[in-house]
Amino acid sequence: MYLIQVGQEDTSYNVDPSIHFDRSFPTTPSPAGALPNCLTAILCLQLSGAMLPLPPLSPAETLVDYEPKKLSYTRRHVLLVMFCLAQFLDAFNNSALFSAIPALEVSMGMTESQSTWIISAFQLTFASFLLISGRISDVYNPKTAFIGGVSGLGVISLSAGFVDNTIPIIILRALSGIASAMTIPSALTLLVKIFPDPLEQARAIGLFGGCGCVANVLGLLIGAMFVEWASYHWVFWFVAFVAVPVALACVFIIPPQIAETTDNLEHAEAKWKCLDLVGVSILTVALILFIFAVTSGSTDGWASAIVLVPLIISLSMVVGFFYWETLMPVEKAAIPPRTWFYHNFSILFAVAIMPYLWWSTVFTIFTTLWQNVFEWSVISSAVHMFPIGIVAFAMSFTGSLSRIFSPKWIILTGLSLCMVATILLALGGGKPQDYWPYIFPAFSLGSAGVMLTYTHTNIAIFQAAPSSMAGTVGAIFNGALQFGSAIGLAAVSSIETSVEATHGGSHEYGGRAATFWFLVGVTALQIISVSIFYDRSTDHVPQPKHSTIHPAQHSTHFDEKLNDAKVTNTVVNEKADLADLPV
């Protein structure tokens, strides 16, 4: 027998633990002598034995509080390799086409403005669909989202290899951006679950990010090799030949319990409402318009209507999105306003703009300088970029440092190295003989600094937010990266073009140097911001597993009764009478 006491009432009920109850319970007031509705509902959960209180669920409905059986060392690291391959393909899918664009222009008769959309179409949809991907990964099954994204990327890339027309290839590039956006938040969600230990998690996230940087450099080289010795079609087919086997393997090696959701507690309709489709749609359209505007600004002019109109509309829609989120219940908002008040979340988001801003600026400036001005071959240009990839990959293994030193000092060290490197690039680099005294040390120091910043910002932002929001946090972080890339490309084109118009044209280094001085200013601003606003009081504090409310939970009067019920279990006299329990 168990004595069950409800709320602050003096009434107690004796319950036989062998009795099981179904989920049906009266919605009308209970008759005299019967259990109150709130207690009946608790008993209807079909628990036997000791009546233990239910653990709280996460905002994403994932069973974060039920620790799954730890996977074997081999299986965990095979999964890490699969996720890193997906990250590699996403970055490769963009960087390899830098080498293939000249061949695409000749083969398809593209204009220069059309060829820019081979890159921009991917970046536009990739950045814009990250948030909806993160919500799907949090609310639904991240395994399904990841496998769907990787397999979709493989099928789309396979189809793109057979296309020889401009409009279809741009459409397929946009679709591949959506597929790639499905892989990143879901992979990060799974990583956080597979590596719950903070030290292992930091290492895994660092390696995951390092693979993206390596792909940026190797993509240039592999793309150049395909164009030089085969055809540009193989750039797309390479992605397909890697993506499809990865997707098939993950069907079997990602354990279902890692990505389990509480389907038995919530219907699909309830989960659907938790996606916040209105808010996500507003922000997605705003990002599409913003990236379109900054991409078109360098070619159509910043004062043109085709740039100003979408730019103004996008900024207005961003304001509208944040206002909409304040109106939504916290448990259903795509990005609850309180997200920005997690410790250091806002400053880490701002720092996340820096890595891709620096890398995209360096790649854009030197690939065009070396090939168009120095007349180096595509392969030679890619080889000269190797220090960036090698040093960045080495720095991706520094994730464990975040458990020894404060992320604040590691991030500031990375930003300082980045500033020194950027100053070197601003002072020299306009001649082939400048490579070893200026460019090589700048690439080494800058890539080390940027990768330190990237890795430890990534680790810190995941430690700041609940693990159940991993998909959404991953989407926000990668959205900041892509936002930085878009700003970088726009800044490079605008500053370089305006300075070159009065300082010797594109064959002079003045415009490129001005771009790097702009980057020095951005880096200095970030160093000051981190120094002032980063709070070290939560360093090395265990990551929260869940928020107070999960998104599919509805707030009703009945729920309030359940929350108010205080249920305790004690062994009592066997002579106590049984309560009259409605079934």
Image (cartoon, grey):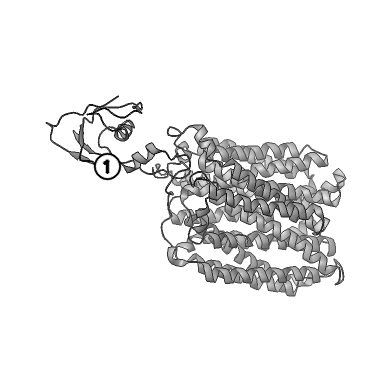
Q: Specify whether 305 is left or right of 135.
A: right
State the image coordinates of residue 308 (x, y, percent, origin top left): 77, 55
Q: Nearer the viewer, residue 563 or 376?
A: 563
Residue 220 visible within the image? no
Location of residue 261 with respect to 217 vertically, above or below = above
Relative height, residue 343 to residue 25 (above, below): below
What is the x, y in percent for residue 275? 55, 41
Using a 10 Å C-alpha cutoff, classify the residue at mark 1 as few (fewer than 14 neighbours), some (14 to 19) or many (20 or more).
some
Left or right: residue 7 versus residue 283 is left
Closer-to-camera residue (460/250): 460
Residue 473 visible to the viewer: yes
* Image position of 7 (left or right of 241): left
**Quadrant (top left, top right, bottom left, bottom right) of the C terminus:** top left
Name which residue lies at 66% across and 47% down. 128
- Amino acid type shown at disc 1: Gly
Number of numbered discs visible in the structure rendering: 1
Vertical order, 471 against 40 (above or below): below
The one nearer the camera, 433 or 96, is: 96
Per the image, label 1 sits on a secondary structure element best described as loop
Residue 153 rendering spot, x and y as whole percentages: 66, 40
Relative height, residue 270 to residue 111 (above, below): above
Query: In front here: 4 or 483?
Result: 4
- Residue at label 1? 7
Q: Which residue is drawn at the image coordinates 74% and 75% (left, top)?
A: 427
Instruction: Report the quarter where the N terminus lies.
Output: top left
Residue visible at 64% across and 69% down in the picture: 523
**Residue at the spot 80% in from the left edge and 69% down from the top edge:** 511
Residue at the far top: name it: 583
- Residue 412: x and y in percent read 55, 69
